[in-house]
Amino acid sequence: MKKTLKKFILIGVAKKILFLAVMLFSQFACADNATALLDKAAAKFKAAGNVKIGFQVTTESGSTTGYIDIAGNKFHCDMAGLRVWFDGENMWHYVKSNEEVNITNPSAAEAAKLNPYSFISLYKKGYTCKMGKSTASYHEILLTGKKGSAYQNVVVRFEKKDYKPLYIKTVTAKHTTEFTVNSYLTKQNFPASTFTFNKKDFPKVEVVDLR
C-alpha cells in the first residue's frame, strides 16, 4: 500500500512539473499588461523548439531535482524515484521503489492532463491573472483559478531580458508545490528513443501492460 501511495504521489508531482511548461505558453483572461507579457513568453517558448528544463521541486515532504525533455507532444521526465516517457501515443511510468513499469495508452483527455501542448485549450479560460511583485530582473504573474480549475493559485516568474522561465508555485487546498528552473536549454535535438522506455536498460524491471 505504501509503495502504491508513493507511486501516485510521484506521478502527481510529475504532472505538476509539466504544468510549468503549460503556464509558459497558455493564454489567460488577464489584465492588459499581464496578457502582453504572457503573449511574449508564449512566443519565446514556441520559438525555443525542443527544450530541456532542469528543475528543483519543493513540496511539504521535501525537495528533489530532475529534468524534463519536451518535443512537440512528446516528453520525458526524470526525477528522483520516477521516470515518465510519452511518445505521443504510449506512456510508460517507472517507479524505482516498485521496480515496475506501467504502460498505458491514454485517451485524448488523459493525455491532456500530462501533455503541455494539450493544456493550451484546457487552461485558456481556467484562470484570471494580474501582475505580481516584479523586480528589476523578472516579471511575476499571479493567477487565480476559477471554479473547477486544477489550482487555486499559481505564481509564475520569467526573466525580463529574454522571458526565460524561472519559477512557478502551484497552490491547491491541500498542497503547495514550488518549482525553480536551474537550467533551460533550447533548440535541442532529441532522438526518438528519448521518449520511449527501453526494457534493455532496465532488465530487472517488471513491465505491466495496461493498454
Image: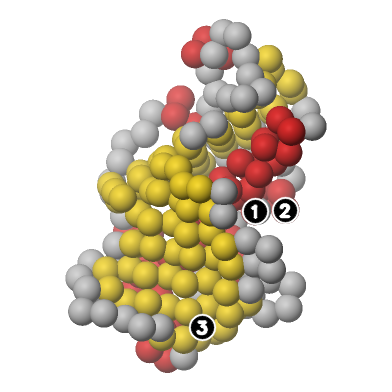
Q: Residue at the spot x=73%, y=38% of the render?
A: 5
Q: Nearer the viewer, residue 3 or 192?
A: 3
Q: Position of residue 179 (x, y in %)?
A: 44, 56
Q: Residue at the spot x=56%, y=54% of the render?
A: 60
Nearer mark to the viewer, of 2 and 3: 3
Q: CA distance from mark 2 to mark 3?
A: 25 Å
Give the amino acid at mark 3: Cys
| Residue neighbourhood size for the residue with mark 1, other residues' Cα within 10 Å, grouped as few (<14), some (14–19), many (≥20) | some
Q: Are marks 2 and 3 in contact (CB under 8 Å)?
A: no
Can residue 59 be spotted in the picture?
yes
What residue is shown with label 2?
A: 109
Vertical position of residue 166 compared to residue 74: above or below: below
Q: Are marks 2 and 1 in contact (CB under 8 Å)?
A: yes
| Residue neighbourhood size for the residue with mark 3, other residues' Cα within 10 Å, grouped as few (<14), some (14–19), many (≥20) | many
Q: How many marks?
A: 3
Q: Residue 129, labelled with which disc?
A: 3
Give the amino acid at mark 2: Ala
Q: Secondary structure at mark 3?
A: strand
Q: CA distance from mark 1 to mark 3?
A: 22 Å
Q: Residue 112, labelled with which disc?
A: 1
Q: Residue at the spot x=36%, y=45% of the render?
A: 54
Vertical position of residue 5 compared to residue 201: above or below: below
Vertical position of residue 127 compared to residue 177: above or below: below
Give the amino acid at mark 1: Ala
